[in-house]
Amino acid sequence: MKKIIFLLFIGFSLNGYAQFNQAWRGKKCAVVITYDDAINEHLDNALPVLDSLGLKATFYITAFSASMQTRLNEWKNLTTKGYELGNHTLYHPCMGGAGREWVSKDYDLDNYSVKRMVDETRMTNLFLQSLDGKTKRTFAFTCGDMKIGDSSFINGMKNDFVAARAVRNEMHKINEVDLYNVDCYVVNNHSFEQMKEWVDKSVQTNSLLVILFHGVGGGNGLNVSIDNHRKILSYIKQQEKDILIAPMIEVAEHIKLWQVNDKVAKAQQQATQADYENMLVQLNITSTRPGPSGNPSAPNAANSDEAKATQYTSLPDPLVLENGKKVTNAKTWWNKRRPEIAEDFNKEIYGRVPKNTPKVNWEVTSTIDTVIGGIAAVTKNLLGHVDNSLYPQLKVDIQLSLTTPKNNNKAVPVIMEFGFLFPPGFRLPPPPAGTLVQKSWQEQVIEKGWAFAVIVPASYQADNGAGLTQGIIGLCNKGQTRKPDDWGTLRAWAWGASRAIDYFETDATVDAKKIAIEGLSRYGKAALVTMAFEPRIAVGCIGSSGAGGAKILRRIYGEQVENLASSGEYHWFAGNFIKYAVNPLTQNDLPVDAHELVALCAPRPVFISSGSPNVEGKWVDAKGMFLGGAYAGPVYTLLGKKDLGTTAYPDEQTLLDSGDIAFRQHNGGHTIGPNWPYFLQFASRYFTP
């Protein structure tokens, strides 16, 4: 489970939205249990087994069945237990003829019009709504018949139903499911072993299995024995950890959302690839070197052998001017050397912010009294409306929230986090069993009497290449593609944080001179870039930022320049950065490296956080991040501050905080969590009056 949490974050940059759009909510397949025709045996024989196992099924109701007429309240009671009442028409009409002599003339579809079928089906929906109060429902074709004459009657009712179940004894993967022709396996005196094969196949092929029961211990010629029915339901229940088991309506809505998200993701990937190829053309690049894999088991796995990591012979010296002269005083640093380093980062790595970015008008959309860890607090939700008068075709808003202690009559420090925006319904995996539960970072901040803010970077600049003609970057470029030295997403996210600080300077509840920035993973990169270029940031907490953040890029360990320059991550950077993944250039040709990005934060304090390589993984390169802080030390010393105090990589859980650069590698995964108390203690040295 620990590894899953780590792979979640690195995988998002590699595979985009697909990591969050899990086919079966993290399980191997889905099984839907259905019963047709609303007969007494469903209530008497099937329902007790379902109840005893805690399984939820769909009962496709023929509204005028004999059982519905005599046991209506019992059928209505199913809705209170979480079962779905599906629509199986009013009178169960089917195509008659040879082999179906049991179909009466009155309910032979040959004698129906499409209008009659639609009217009766909608009447059944109203009847079922009177029982369960629900307007969303699924449908099951009677006898599997889908047409009246040559006309498919379901087409005119697609807005009436989320899905329609057919009869074809097939199963499909989630991307292959036709929601208005959902296949099922019809039970017709099958043995437990035969039905078990269906379930096993769905698990093995990651498919949707819909099982259709009619008679259960009698009641219909298409029957299953009571014993085999119980056995197969028990077997499905035993596989619950691998199988999504739910009524048809729930599974169908999941499939519908998945398919929409998949379509969006594929379109996004195509647009990203087109933008990437456009940048390659601008740079006269025909191919790039592939990066290593983040999967330790892959043939091309990233290096995790420290003996192979230091293949460079030197790093750029932050205290040597481009003309070769040493920087020996603070004035030269501020006036000459620091601008040189900033220019190299602007041109070759992160890109240039336009000289005249639009103004932002902040609106408080709501103010909510809340309680954080037992302490009364007030949350303001804000939108930063970006002036789009020069290009009205794009609308950009910055999402921000600010939470302050309620019973406080003075301005307080604020910790601002770059916050992830997960898809609806997404939940991170729970921590491993036995994990010590600690207070949230928000509780810890509020307990200190400080405020916290969460800015959502994806609200004003999407985390993909397709979004580069949208958001604040697209707005500034009037919807056109970037030039090679234009800003990338990391600089854009940093720009948004600066605009949040503009707001803080107008809010009397916070002390705008005591602002800390914090972020994890890609947002750890963004937090460091923000602090490097935004002088109003007082303290930084840089969490597992890896390559593109605090990690020395010249180290051959974990993620590499080639990964960052790929179509999955290039949007974080200037287009020019891609050149360093193209022969003959390599990471050793970069004019600057991560220690100089940390040096741009000097003399302000920076806390670098990492997880354990055995839990978080080695992709982010904890030692590389440590060295990014250590090698920035000479600049801090020049400016009268204290460095890390060592260049020797410390043991796990060793806190280095005696200087103005701090480092700690906790024993957890891809999170800042265990390091929050240490960071807040570190920040207190600078925020305490």
Image (spheres, rainbow, N blue to C red):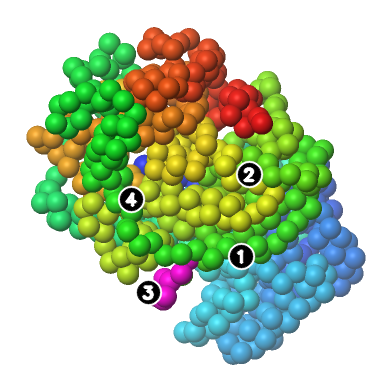
Q: Which residue is mark 2?
A: 511
Question: Could you say which is closer to the camera, residue 575 or residue 628?
Answer: 628
Q: Are marks 2 and 1 in contact (CB under 8 Å)?
A: no
Comes first in the chain, label 2 or label 4 = 4
Q: At which x and y percent is residue 387? A: 46, 69
Residues under numbered marks 2 and 3 in contact, where contact means CB atoms less than 8 Å apart: no
Q: Could you say whether the residue bearing mark 4 is in a helix, strand or loop?
A: loop
In the image: residue 473, left or right of residue 73:
left
Residue where numbered disc 4 is placed: 488
Q: Is mark 1 in CB contact (under 8 Å) with mark 3? A: no
Q: Amino acid at mark 4?
A: Gly
Image coordinates for residue 143, horizontal then vertical, percent: 60, 69
Distance in Å between CA atoms under marks 2 and 1:
19 Å
* Residue 557 visible within the image: yes
Mark 1: amino acid: Glu
Q: Note whether residue 209 is visible.
A: no
Q: Secondary structure at mark 3?
A: loop
- Mark 3: give few (<14), some (14-19) or many (20+) Cα within 10 Å: few
Q: Mark 4 or mark 1, which is nearer to you?
A: 1
Position of residue 115 in the picture relative to residue 408 (left or right) = left
Within-10-Å neighbours for mark 1: few <14, some 14–19, many 20+ = few
Q: Amino acid at mark 2?
A: Asp
Magenta-tinted stretch = 386-394
| Quadrant into which the N terminus falls | top right
Label 4 crowd (10 A; few <14 / some 14-19 / many >=20): many
Residue nearer the viewer, 571 or 147: 571
